[in-house]
Amino acid sequence: MTHVLAIDQGTTSSRAILFDSDLKVVASAQEEFPQHFPASGWVEHDPADLWSTTAGTCRAAIERAGLKPEDITAIGITNQRETTLVWDKITGEPIHNAIVWQDRRTADHCAALRDGGHEEMFTDRTGLLLDPYFSGTKLAWLLDNVDGARARAEAGELLFGTVDCFLIWKLTGGAVHATDATNAARTLLYDIRKGRWSQTICDLLNIPMVMLPDVKDCAADFGTTRADLFGREIPITGVAGDQQAATVGQACFQPGMLKSTYGTGCFALLNTGETPVRSNNRLLTTIAYQLDGKPTYALEGSIFIAGAVVQWLRDGLQIIREAKETQPLAEGADPAQNVIMVPAFTGLGAPYWNAECRGAVYGLTRNSGPAEFAKAALESVGYQTRDLLEAMTADWAGHEGGEQVLRVDGGMSASDWAMQFLSDILGAPVDRPEVLETTALGAAWLAGMQAGIYPDMEGFAKSWALQNRFAPEMAAETRDQKYAGWQRAVQATLSV
């Protein structure tokens, strides 16, 4: 048994990637699934799609690799975080579609809790803000709006889980109802300092604690798969939310190390070590990973729309057919134009946390066209990342005296143009690793390390390899002017 199967269940697709004993990719499979938008600001997934694409891509990856079931040592899972599911404890039948992390339907509930003076308590215990982004108010909405759900939950008939938890339950045939500390830390229900579900918060949100899963380390025993799924029972030994898995995959194990992942959204995490750091700039305090019962904490900034803005160019405006077309378009944009796009399609995340504002484009002229839109879309990701990093450096005293280097991964990091602009607008080096699939890599390492076929943390960190370093080339005056323009555009968007 020499391979690890990493399941990467994301917002728009499910992937399965097989890694060999040297942590090299040997085969992968990916399948997109539909997004459902039942109302403005609402986003849902069909749980059947999450499960069928996960199981299907796992089988396809194994087949493409030409492996037998006995060749696979273990399974690691990484997943879109905060997305909320509730299902029947016996049948496994979901009571409703999954409510996706992007969904804003509980904005009024969050506002009422803030108005009631509760946000300080939530932030102190969970490290999070009162925002529809997180699972807690989504779960409360399901119990309040699905007929009979609350009575069934109180009777112990329903289970709650984030996507990892739902997949574990399905993979094990209902034998295991568990999550890991990183996913628990994103629910708005978990006390990240005490390492347990918060009775106080569950009482306030009227959530029966009997619904909640067991919480384990990121590398732990999560049960074994049903034998009929892949030809034999395979242990599940690693689980982490996607951004924490990417942090692990980038080997950001030392305090001060920083990574940013560019998928549907953009998520930057700064390792702050054994002590949770309270943000004064509306960043999140979260668990980066937990091993041997000991959490390592991080500051996190979340951007809701990163790669999704390129999808909008493709699917909404239909000015491109493939994401890779944005780079040549951006390169050919008119340098005399200064089009700024604020992609607040589902509100703005950190450090603004405004659920109600919506996207806007500024600086349009009669000559503005697809090239200028593509350039503005890619630049918006760089600007938003600078917002996050400035907030992080203001919050964490440990950054002083050292050069800030950002490790990047995710689909958009493959764009040289976007990464060069990112370095330019940050005024800091941007390091792109040889392995861009760091989210799956992190999940695979956790599982393989727990199973005994991969090296320990120190050995894994030594294997991290640089593919390209982007150094800033933009003049400081230009950088400051462009960022000031972005800040004006954001303020104008927030004021609408």
Image: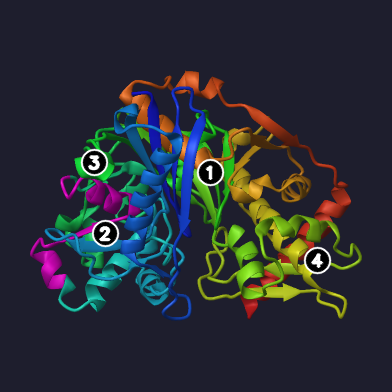
Up/down of 458 relative to 491, above or below: above
Residue 309 vertical position relative to residue 27 in the rendered view, above or below: below
Q: Please tell me the numbered disc located at residue 371.
A: 4
Mark 2 vs mark 3, CA separation in Å:
33 Å
Residue drawn 47% across the image and 40% down it: 440
Visual colour scheme:
rainbow
Whether label 4 touches label 3, CB < 8 Å: no
Answer left or right for 283 relative to 21.
Answer: right
On the picture, is 92 further left or further right than 312? left
Confirm or deny contact between disc 1 and disc 2 (CB under 8 A): no
CB under 8 Å between discs 1 and 3: no
Residue 50: where, in percent of width, then height?
A: 36, 58
Q: Which residue is mark 2?
A: 201
Label of residue 492 in the image: none
> Residue 225 got which mark?
3
The magenta stretch spans which residues? 150-175
Q: Amino acid at mark 1?
A: Leu
Which residue appears at 20% of the width and 48% of the height? Answer: 177
SS at circle 4 = helix
Q: Residue at x 76, y 55 (%)?
A: 327
